[in-house]
Amino acid sequence: MLKRILTGAGALLLVLLVVAGTVLWDPLPANPPASELAAAAADYDAEVIRDEYGVPHVHGARDADAAFGLAYAHAEDDFETIQETVAAGRGIMADYRGRDAAPLDYIVALLGVWDTVDARYETDVPGDVKALADAYAAGLNLYAAEHPKATWRGLAPFTSRDVVAGFVFKTPFFYGLDATFLELFGKDYTQTIALDPADGRKAFLIGPRTMAERGSNAIAVSARRAGDDVTRLVINSHQPLTGPVAWYEAQISSDEGLDITGGLFPGTPVILHGFNRNLGWANTVSAQDLVDTYVLTVNPDNASQYKLDGAWVDFEETEATLNIRLAGPFALKVRRKVLRSAHGPVIKAAHGTYAVRFAGMGEIRQLEQYYRLNKAEDMDGFMTAMSLNALPSINYVYADRDANVAFIHNGQYPARHDSWDWSGDLPGDRSDLIWQGYRPWTDVPKLVNPVSGLVYNSNNTPYSATDGPDNLRSEGFPQSMGLQTNETNRSLRMIELTDGTSPINEPDLLALKFDTSYAEQSEAADLIARVLAIDWSQEPEMAEAAKRLAAWDMTMDADSRYAALGGLTVLREITEKYTHMPAPGPETAFREAVEWLMVHHGRIDPEWGEVNRLVRGPVSLPISGGPDTLRAVYPAGMGDDGELHMTAGDTWIALVEWDRQGHQAARVISPYGSATLDKASPHYADQAPLFAAEEWRPAHLTREDVLANATRAYRPGKD
C-alpha cells in the first residue's frame, strides 16, 4: 500500500514538474543571421585609427559615418557594457540578469520610457538625429554579426530607438531621481507635507529628507586672468571607473564639420563633454530640486481611484510583464500594475500612495541637444544648442578660443507657483499644484565672463561660481526653482585657494586640480575636531593616536604618514551620502581606523600610498587624494587586504588651452586605458602609471598627429 502511495506521489511530482517546466519554458530567441545584421553597414564608411594608447579617432564623410565607426570601435572595447545599457533601456534586464534586475525593468515601465519613444520618436526627433542613431545602431549590429558568441541571445538587432531610449531613461538619474524612487519604495519613508501658503503657514518637515550628491570638478580661466594670455579649461567629471556611466574617450570627425574629442558613455553616439577646435565644456552633476512628490488620497471604497479637486478620478492603469530569467531556457513571467495619475508615475507603498512629477518626464530631445553641442562653433552656437533646454539638469563650465568663460546651472526648471514651498511633499488632491512645462531658457542661472576671469563648479551652489564680486545671488531667483545652497569641500578649497586677482597660469591651475586638502570649514575638519575634543587620557594607546591625528595637516598626499589615520576616520562620514550606508560616530570611526591600521599595517602611520591604491589587474599603484578632495579618489571600502582600491572619482580628465592667436593644445588622461574589458590588451591599464603620477598624455587633434602616432587603421565592414 505504502509503495503504491509513494509511486503515486512520484508520478504526481513528475506531472507537476512537467507542467511547471512547460509554464516556465521561455528560451531567448536566436539573433538574426550575420548577413541580416550586417546589411545596413554597407550604407556607411568610417575610418578608425587607434593611437599609441588605443584611443579611437574616427572619421567619416558624414556625421552618420563617424557615429557608425564610433559604435564599432567602442564595441571592440566594451561590447558587454553597451549591451547592458541597451537591455536596461529596453526594460528587459531581468531576462538576462534574473530577479535582482527586475526592479530596474519595472522603473523603465513606470517612467514610461517606451511610451515616450513610441509617441514622440517620429515627430520630435529630427531627421539628422535619426540618421545619427541609425548609423550608431548599424555599427553595433555589424560588430554583433562578426562576434555572435559575444552577443546576448535575443538582444540583436540594435535599433535607433534603443539609442534614443537610453537617453530618455538615464538622464533624469543624474540629478537624483533614482534616489527619490528608492526612498519611496523603502519601508521607512517619512512624508514631508507642504501646507497651503494661503493660510499663512509655511511647510514643515516631520523628518529629514536629503538628496544624494555626486562629485565632479570643472574650472575655466580666461586669458586675461591666466597671466600668460592662454585660456584654459579643466574637464574633470567624477564617475565610476568602469560600468555603464564610466567615461570612454574618443575623437570623432567628419567632412560635415564634426570634430570633437571627449568622453562618452556606452551606447551614446556623440561626445557628452569634451572639446572641439573652438570651444569646450565640462559637466558637473547638479542637485536642484527637480522632483516633486505628491501624497495621494486613495478612495477607500475603490483602490483604483484617487481624489483630485474634490472628485474621485481613475488611475491610468497598464501592466508591465517582467520576464525573470531563472536558469537556461526557463523564465518566470511576473505581471505588475503600472499606475499613473495626472501628476505622473504612481508608487503604492506600505506607508502611502505617491505620485512623482520630475524634470525630463516625457522628454525625447536629449540626443538632439548633445549633437548640436558637438557641432557648435562659437559661444553663440553653444548657447543656441543649450537653449533647446532638453537636458533636465547638469552644470556646464565653458571656455573657448575667444577667451570667453561661462558657468550655466542648467536645468529644466518646473514652472511652479512661487508662493508654495516645494521642498517637501505636496498635497495630491489639487490640480493647480500640477505644474505644466518649464521656465524659459532665459531664466536658467548663468554667469558669463565674470570680472575675475575664473569660473568653477564642484557640485556646489551656483551662488559660488567665481572668486570675484559678481557671483549670482539668491535674491535674483525665485525660491521655487529649488537652487542648491550647499558647498562641498572641493568648492571650499577653491574659495580658500583663489583671491579674485592673482594670475592662475598653468602650474597654478594644475595645483588647484590636484589639491588633496580638506578645507578649514569642511565636514572632515569638523569631524576631526570632534574626535580631538574627546578625553583620551585614560587610554594611552588612543591618546597617542589622538596626538598623531592632531598633527595631521588635512592633506591626503600619497607620502603622508598622517593621512591614513585621518582619512580613515572621516571616510565613511563623507561617503555616506553616496553609499547610503550609515556612518559610525566620530569616536567609533576613530577607534576602528586605529584598529584597522594596526591589524593590517602594524602601525597607525603607514604612508597613505600604502593604503590608497589604484589597482587594475596586476597593476597596483599608490595614489594621492581622497573623498571630496579636488584630487577625488573614492574607494569601494576598507578592504580585508589592508588597502583602499579606487573605484570612482577622477576619471577621464582633460586640460584644454587656447592662446590669443587661437592655437589649441590639449592634454588628457584616464585612470585605466581604452581597452575596458580585454585584460590581455596592452591598453587595459597602460595609462594607470601616468594617472597615478598626476601626469598627462597629449591629445592628438590633427590628422597628421593622429597618423604619426597610429598603431592600427581600419574601416569597419570594409577591411
Image: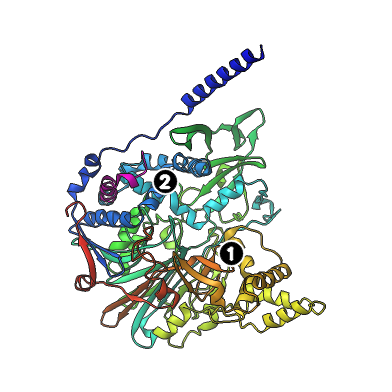
Q: Which amino acid does label 1 sit on?
A: Gly
Q: Residue at x 59, y 68 (%)?
A: 642
Q: Residue at x 35, y 88 (%)?
A: 228
Q: What stretch is highlighted in magenta?
A: 133-154
**In this rendering, position of residue 628 left or right of residue 119:** right
Q: Is residue 278 above or below residue 17?
A: below
118 and 711: which is toward the camera: 711
Q: Where is residue 638 in the image (x, y as percent from the top left)?
A: 60, 65
Residue placed under numbered mark 1 in the picture: 639
Circle 2 SS class? helix
Circle 1 SS class? loop
Of callouts 2 and 1, the N-terminal one: 2
The answer to whether mark 2 and mark 1 are in CB contact below 8 A is: no
The colour scheme is rainbow
Q: Which residue is drawn at 66% across and 77% down?
A: 604
Q: Where is residue 171 in the image (x, y as percent from the top left)?
A: 44, 54
Residue placed under numbered mark 2 in the picture: 89
* Mark 2: few/some/many CA within 10 Å (<14, 14-19, 20+): many
- Dominant secondary structure of the residues highlighted in magenta in the image: helix
